[in-house]
Image (cartoon, rainbow, N blue to C red):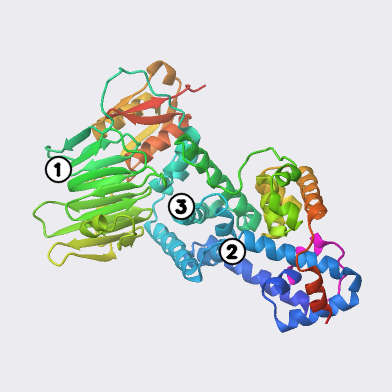
Amino acid sequence: MNQDEHISNASELNIRLWQRFKAGDAEALGQLAQTHYRALYNYATKFSSDPDFIRDSIQELYLELWERRNFLSETAFVKSYLLKALRHKLIKESIRLKRFHEPQTAIFDTEPSDPSIETNIIEDEHIRFRNGHLKRIISLLSKRQQEIIYLRFYQNLDNEDIASVMGLGRQSVSNLLYRTLKEIKDIWAPAEFFWVLLFLLS
Amino acid sequence: MSLHRIFTVEELATDESFRRWVMAPTPELDRYWQQWLQQNADRAGVAVRARELVQAVHEIYKDDLSDDMLRHEIAEITRIAGERKAEGRVPFYHRAIWRAAAVLLLTGGLSWLYYTSHNTVAPSGTGQKITLASEMVIKTNATEVEMTVLLSDNSVATLAKGSSIRYPRQFSANERRIYLTGEAFFDVTKNPEQPFLVYTSETVTKVLGTSFRIKAFEGDNTEMVAVKTGRVSVYAKKEYETSQGSIPAGVILNPNQQVVFNRKDNKLEKSGIANPVLLAESAVQKEQVFDDRPVAEAFDALAKAYGISIAYQPETLSNCMISAQFNEENLKQRLNAICQAIGAGYDMEDDRVVISSKGCN
């Protein structure tokens, strides 16, 4: 099938879905919710470890959009907008829980400081001897660096969307991402380098 | 698919087709990328790194959402949206309260959002009463009308006549436990870290933040729990108490569902709600209209309608005006709407609502 035809069919379907949503068709909301539900759920698990709370939050997010359907534009269902709205919701709640002196278990947070990865690595004997297991390197990044890596390579957002979701300037995202990738590269020796290389070229 | 040259780890790792090949390869993708590697042999090292990066990120950040759960959640969103539409309730609000109106339409389940941003109430310096936190408070409604009880966590219980509740003056840190005899509607402030538990003679109902009604009169053959908003778990009391440590078998209720406990066969039976009246906080509709009135007047009217006391500083509020119309909204929804409209907060202390405000310009 011709590529252009494919695209126009896909967007036509979305327009129809959008019109049904605007007209108050609850099934259409369900279909729209299905599109990014997994992405939202996954993101939320980085802020809360309570699955009930996460499901309630996402449900509320979509029902809010439903109640406001007469005033919404299509962009409300764009992935980066949804991620941003959910992040906002979850952080608001975690701030409230801090007031109750609850332990924080979030993987990402709004902490603005980013100590160089080397500060963390020096403490980590394991990584010095194994010299560069990627998963370990990422887990040693600052929370903000981890969130950028996550949004870029798990959610596959571009710098502009990352900036919007995290509420940062586009330039700071681009700088931080560049610095983070460089830090990773400096100490990363791909684990299965030769093995995979042989496999790929066979 | 066109053969395009990609040169960096980042570019490869964010290419949709490459990502699919790494995470869920098909023969077609395999063919394409093997061919790509042969034509870009100098990029093999980059491809290996990009592959490991995509895999590592997906392993680190994986979650436990099953297909079943996903289907269930989408069905729930669809169902509740359908019901909200069927209600067709579009109250009219003046502009001043428009933002608050949006909150009301979403029902009380959202009230926690409000507290997170506005709850700045400092403990008011009213009297240094020495009370034991664990001291039990008993409220019995001996009147012929409903009785509104304010709890220290900003939750509200509406007691039917002949009903009584018992609870500690201050809830313990890990749960909010209440004992009920008779019938009550609860509008519970959301706090996932401190579940709200209602004990009756036969059942235990566990919630994180929601509104629901329980009917458990002594002498009746059945007990009933009906849910208006949020998610509620109901357990037979015997099972709940013998299962300490493990997770007891219970029934999970979603909005507009109810469960009936039958004393004779010791069984919980779940169904839809036949009588929508059960889902109202109050049996009597408390219609209120404020058309550009001083907010103090609205607070006084609320206090009168619910038989509670609301404390505020008249001087601070003297410039605050409010326009709102309430029909089916709960007490908490009304308080949330008014407070949000004038940028104030509130807390429930010692059987009264205390308003904190910096005033209006």
Which of pointers 1 and 3 indicates the residue nearer the eye?
3
Instruction: Identify the residue position indicated by label 2 in the image.
Output: A18
**Secondary structure category for the residue under label 3:** helix
Q: CA distance from mark 1 to mark 3?
A: 34 Å
Task: Give the residue type at disc 2.
Answer: Trp
Horizontal relation, residue B325 to residue B340: left or right: left
Horizontal relation, residue B188 to residue A20: left or right: left
Horizontal relation, residue A172 to residue B331: left or right: right
Instruction: Identify the residue position indicated by label 3 in the image.
Output: A53
**Which disc is residue B161 wearing?**
1
Residue drawn at x 17%, y 64% is B266
Position of residue B54 relative to residue B184, above or below, is below
In magenta segment, residue B6: yes
Q: CA distance from mark 1 to mark 2?
A: 49 Å
Between B232 and B35, the residue placed more toward the observer is: B35
Residue A103 x %, y %: 49, 42
Mark 3 and mark 1 in contact (Cβ < 8 Å)?
no
Magenta region: B1-17
Mark 2 and mark 1 in contact (Cβ < 8 Å)?
no
Crowding near the residue tagged with mark 3, few <14, some 14–19, many ≥20 C-alpha atoms within 10 Å:
many
In magenta segment, residue B358: no
**Which disc is residue A63 wearing?**
none
Quick one: label 2 or label 3, which is nearer the N terminus? Answer: 2
Host chain of mark 1: B
